[in-house]
């Protein structure tokens, strides 16, 4: 794990000059340990100390980028085994695999479908993250042709799957600018794969089916040869073995700081399972338990949506709940005369009230205020859901142009805001809704008379 | 280069064993593990996690068509439903007394006793009975349920911080398991276990339900609360080391994503596939985080999740 304040202190000048802004070098060391200060704030730290501290603060799992441009996949740099200890950071890439033995038109159609797939959740658009192309034919020219066709059809990052260096070379010639991941170097082909990874500056996956010792030997060999961006395939498949091995790898990297295995992991849930649905369950396991790039053999919108949602859940910072993008949301198909309700942007609050409105059949407008992810009462007591905030959101979202009436329903929990709100929004009548989302349907039935 | 040494965690605590069933009823033991889920390379996991099927005492009102077609007419009668659940591979039956809720029938203690008698007679699996979730009604119906099942060591719930005395008392006198439900908070979960053991519920007669948010609806909380409880228990905290139960099925199938085929974006895909994925991904996440019993609703999910648990248990 990272250095403690005392360990860092040993590398500092110990002059207590205060130029870093801290009263003593020890205080500065403590701030560094807590990642609340930068070493560059100390003008006197020696070059040797800088180097030693940089080596010690190197992330235990390397951050690796696959692809170039906006859609690149960044994985690794995780610092905890359990999300509650801090948070998981870099969402695993969900990659769909095609094979060069499939008819080319079938490949390009699937790649098109995957690339165009978009789904909204909590006001954010998600999609699939990449395409893997496998040299199933064994033929270099066929592979290159297929890879080129795929690249012409998508701007998603690619994972090139071939163990034959000639095939890999032929494909890289066509698409190396897009920085695809090379999968994979193994015991037999590693020298040639290292050459290719260096020549084209692409990340290299290293695969071993012969235990973690061999895997570590291969990654060390690649690292020593100058390939820094590595991805690991420990060769295990299926539920039990991947849970155990991926847990061991994460522990080795974080708890033991075992550098040769400090890289993100690529998984193939389709290879350890018998159906699309079972593959989805294993992919779900890999999302929560330490997968970095997850290569799927089936693509369907329903499963893609479920996996994207799971990933969003697991990779949410526990200190920062999932938030809705503030805005004016439509429930069913609202008219200008439909009810207007206001709530906070804590996703579960939003889903509760939106779900109840929908279930009760109320086409309506739901105005979501930015409360930094806090629920109604918590936000109110923290001063993040007050009359001023609500009034500003009503104006910023042009609610008055969407509805012809001037009635705003506020959550019953913040009934006290009514008076202030009527002052802040003089044209509006403030209606105090129920305390619980569950009662909103019956409340509107009784009180909504527009 | 030095060889890779697999890091082994030495845990000091272990999860308590809890036995459900007894008398003529089949017995199942859950718990007993002294490591995190399925990490058998560093500890022992004597009892596999179990899959329960949840049934109700009343025909479900707003269920997904996918669930209704899977169960057919069985949902009209709890005894038939329970038998069908056995055919579909249930290892435990969870019976929820929905009809006792004031807003969905308000049936009383006699009705609850009749239902439980019928289900007990129909199947020999361990049973867990959950009340309607309204304090007065829970207390009224669960007391007679407890009497009806005396000697068969069923699970009875929920015991919650605000209402646990009555249910706990009948669990003590009739030898049942108290289901201790707390809202996604390790301290409240522990507090409730302390309250229950203080009034005399044996610690090996408690199952914890730390609550379950479905995929997209707080699953991250359900995951983290389980991991935190498990780490505390394995670290030696004897007041959180009871086995964990999670009602995955009802939570997952309650959501729009599991039910809606009309008026949803095409990107949501097939409703049949989506509903199953919603239940199964919720299940795998809480199982890997630490669950000894999950209750599910769809027979296909039951089959798949049982097979998955088997695979997770089978590997060293």
Image (cartoon, coloured by chain):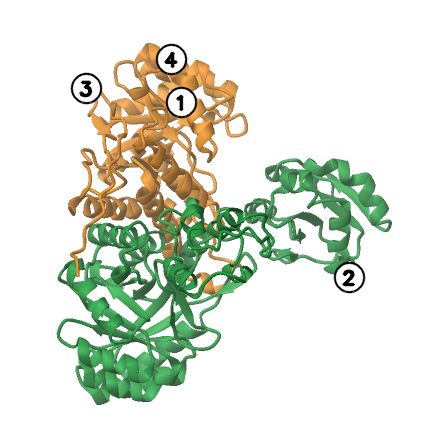
Chain colours: A green, B orange
Local secondary structure at mark 1: helix
Mark 1 and mark 2: Cα distance apart in space: 54 Å
Mark 3, residue position? B24
Mark 1, residue position? B193
Question: In the drawing, does residue A231 fall left or right of residue A114?
Answer: left
Location of residue A35 in the rendering, given as x and y in whole percent from the top left corner = 49, 53
Q: Which residue shows up at 44% across the image and 70% down it?
A: A117
Q: Residues within 10 Å of mark 3 (few under 14, many from 20)?
A: few
Location of residue A334 in the rendering, given as x and y in whole percent from the top left corner = 67, 57
Which picture quadrant has residue B2? bottom left
Mark 4, residue position? B170
Outermost residue toward the top? Answer: B173
Viewer-proximal residue among B219 and A52: A52
Judged by depth in the image, the label closer to the viewer, 1 or 4, is 1
How many numbered marks, from 0 up? 4
Give yes or no for contact between labels 1 and 4 (Cβ–Cβ under 8 Å): no
**Chain letter of disc 1 in the image:** B
Compared to A302, does B89 lie above or below?
A: above
Disc on res. A401: 2
């Amino acid at each position: 794990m990272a250095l403690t304040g005392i360990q860092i202190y040993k590398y500092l000048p110990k002059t207590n000059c205060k130029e870093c802004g801290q009263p003593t070098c020890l205080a500065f060391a403590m701030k560094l340990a807590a990642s609340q200060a930068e070493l560059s704030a100390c003008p006197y730290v020696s070059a040797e100390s800088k180097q030693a501290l940089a080596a010690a603060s190197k992330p235990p799992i390397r951050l690796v980028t696959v692809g170039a441009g906006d859609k690149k996949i960044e994985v690794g740099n995780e610092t905890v085994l359990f999300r509650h200890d801090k948070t998981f950071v870099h969402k695993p890439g969900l990659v769909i695999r095609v094979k060069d033995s499939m008819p080319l038109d079938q490949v390009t159609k699937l790649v098109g479908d995957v690339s165009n797939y978009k789904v909204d959740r909590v006001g954010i658009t998600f999609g699939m993250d990449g395409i893997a192309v496998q040299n199933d034919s064994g033929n270099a020219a066929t592979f290159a042709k297929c890879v080129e066709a795929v690249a012409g059809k998508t701007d998603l990052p690619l994972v090139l799957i071939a163990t034959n260096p000639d095939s890999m070379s032929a494909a890289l010639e066509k698409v190396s600018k897009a920085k695809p991941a090379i999968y994979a170097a193994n015991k037999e082909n590693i020298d040639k794969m290292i050459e290719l990874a260096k020549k084209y500056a692409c990340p290299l996956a290293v695969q071993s089916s012969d235990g973690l010792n061999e895997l570590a030997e291969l990654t060390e060999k690649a690292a020593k040869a100058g390939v820094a961006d590595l991805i690991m395939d420990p060769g295990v498949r299926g539920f039990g073995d991947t849970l155990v091995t991926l847990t061991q790898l994460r522990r080795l990297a974080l708890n033991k700081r075992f550098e040769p295995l400090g890289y993100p992991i690529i998984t193939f849930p389709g290879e350890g399972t018998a159906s699309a649905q079972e593959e989805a369950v294993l992919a779900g396991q890999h999302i929560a338990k330490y997968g970095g790039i997850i290569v799927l053999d089936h693509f369907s919108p329903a499963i893609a949506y479920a996996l994207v949602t799971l990933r969003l859940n697991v990779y949410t910072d526990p200190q920062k709940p999932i938030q809705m993008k503030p805005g004016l949301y439509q429930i069913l198909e609202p008219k200008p005369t439909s009810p207007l309700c206001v709530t906070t942007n804590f996703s579960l609050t939003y889903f509760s009230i939106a779900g109840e409105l929908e279930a009760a059949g109320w086409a309506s407008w739901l105005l979501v205020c930015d409360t930094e992810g806090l629920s109604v009462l918590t936000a109110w007591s923290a001063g993040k859901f007050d009359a001023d905030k609500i009034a500003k959101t009503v104006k910023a979202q042009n609610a008055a142009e969407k509805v012809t009436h001037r009635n705003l329903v506020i959550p019953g929990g913040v009934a006290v805001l009514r008076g202030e709100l009527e002052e802040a929004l003089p044209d509006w009548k403030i209606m105090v809704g129920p305390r619980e989302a569950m009662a909103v349907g019956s409340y509107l039935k009784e009180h909504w008379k527009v | 280069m030095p060889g890779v040494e697999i890091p082994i965690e030495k845990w000091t605590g272990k999860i308590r064993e809890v036995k459900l069933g007894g008398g003529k009823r089949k017995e199942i033991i859950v718990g007993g593990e002294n490591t995190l889920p399925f990490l058998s390379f560093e500890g022992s996991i004597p009892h596999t996690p179990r899959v329960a099927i949840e049934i109700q005492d009343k025909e479900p009102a707003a269920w997904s068509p996918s669930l209704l077609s899977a169960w057919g007419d069985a949902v009209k009668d709890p005894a038939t439903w329970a038998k069908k659940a056995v055919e579909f591979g249930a290892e435990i039956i969870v019976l929820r007394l929905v009809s006792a809720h004031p807003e969905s029938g308000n049936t009383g203690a006699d009705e609850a006793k009749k239902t439980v008698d019928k289900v007990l007679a129909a199947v020999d699996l361990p049973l867990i009975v959950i009340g309607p979730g309204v304090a007065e009604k829970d207390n009224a119906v669960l007391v007679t349920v407890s009497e009806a099942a005396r000697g068969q060591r069923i699970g009875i719930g929920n015991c919650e911080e605000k209402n646990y005395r009555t249910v706990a008392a009948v669990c003590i006198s009739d030898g049942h398991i108290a289901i201790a439900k707390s809202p996604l908070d390790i301290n409240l979960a522990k507090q409730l276990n302390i309250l229950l053991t203080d009034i005399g519920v044996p610690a090996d007669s408690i199952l914890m339900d730390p609550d379950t948010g479905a995929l997209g609806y707080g699953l991250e909380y359900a995951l983290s609360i389980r991991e935190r409880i498990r780490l505390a228990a394995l670290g030696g905290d004897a007041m959180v080391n009871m086995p964990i139960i999670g009602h995955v099925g009802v939570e997952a199938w309650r959501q729009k994503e599991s039910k809606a085929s009309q008026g949803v974006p095409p990107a949501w895909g097939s409703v049949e596939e989506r509903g199953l994925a919603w239940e199964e991904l919720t299940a795998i996440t809480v199982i890997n985080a630490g669950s000894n019993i999950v209750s599910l609703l769809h027979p296909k999910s039951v089959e798949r999740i049982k097979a998955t648990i088997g695979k997770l248990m089978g590997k060293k």
